[in-house]
Amino acid sequence: MSDLSLVLVGAGKMGGAMLTGWLGMGLDPKNVTVIDPGQPDDMKELANKTGFSFLTSPEGVAKADILVIAVKPQMMDKVLPGLVGLVGEKTVLVSIAAGTPIATFRSYLGADLHVVRAMPNTPTQVGRGMIAAFACEGIEADKLETIAELLSSTGKFTWVGSEALIDAVTAVSGSGPAYVFYMVEALSKAGEALGLDAEAAGLLARQTIVGAGELLNQSPLPASTLRENVTSPAGTTAAALAVLMAEEGGLAELMAKATVAARDRSIELSK
């Protein structure tokens, strides 16, 4: 890993998960400073074990090469003014806060601030995350490479070509785990309606989604091929898919409507 100095502001579930991933992939703790006034116990233990600096405020901290913001969007007005001293001419700010545009960071920390907006999702906490990011112009290639490496430490990573696409990323992968969890709920209730008791229906639904996800993870085949492999002509799966894949009222139509709603709300929140 690079010898660039990294400051992480916010050590909650997402920030903490990413930090654990960075340390696990070889980031030198001596180059890391974590700032969180809440001082969560699990992060205290990790700091004691690995040796990174764990502080309650940014006072006295040197300018960062990479400054990662992992606080809730509603905290920005309170947090950002205190970070001015951490920002130098070559600092790159990486934000994982939903709905906070690049313009907001520049309004507090400088009009020429180099910013990467990243959108992770909750499976990041178990090393199966998906992160997509947009980088503003002017960031050095070696720093972009380091940032891509850091953001890949808890799952998969990709760049997108415009800041506006972060709203689409939010709709698909950022909010996406909730869609999957709801599918488990719906499949479980459907099982109960067919006569299964609640415990059995819940177990069947949950493990089916877990197993299908792991099969998808391990297989090189596209999802469409895996679906076809399960589907015998005129069989039970085909009968169910005829409902789910209906042109009107099917799952594709519902998912399109759902992601548009999520994207539009993400746009509203960023204004």
Image: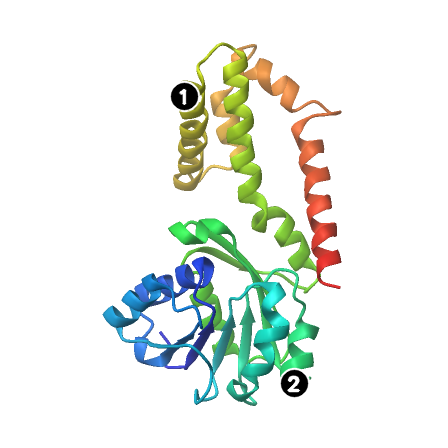
Q: Quadrant of the N terminus?
A: bottom left
Going by the image, does 143 lie left or right of 27?
A: right
* Amino acid type for the residue under numbered disc 2: Gly
- In the image, is 97 to the left or to the right of 250? left
Question: 208 left or right of 243?
Answer: left
Q: Position of residue 214 (x, y in %)?
A: 40, 37
Q: CA distance from mark 1 to mark 2?
A: 55 Å
Q: Which labelled disc corresponds to residue 199?
A: 1
Between 252 and 123, the one lying in front of the other is 123
Q: Residue at x 40, y 25 (%)?
A: 203
* Image vertical order of residue 153 relative to residue 210, above or below: below
Q: Position of residue 84 (x, y in %)?
A: 57, 86
Residue 127 at what x, y percent from top left?
A: 39, 52
Q: Which residue is mark 2?
A: 110
Q: Residues within 10 Å of mark 1 (few under 14, many from 20)?
A: few
* Residue 232 visible at all: no
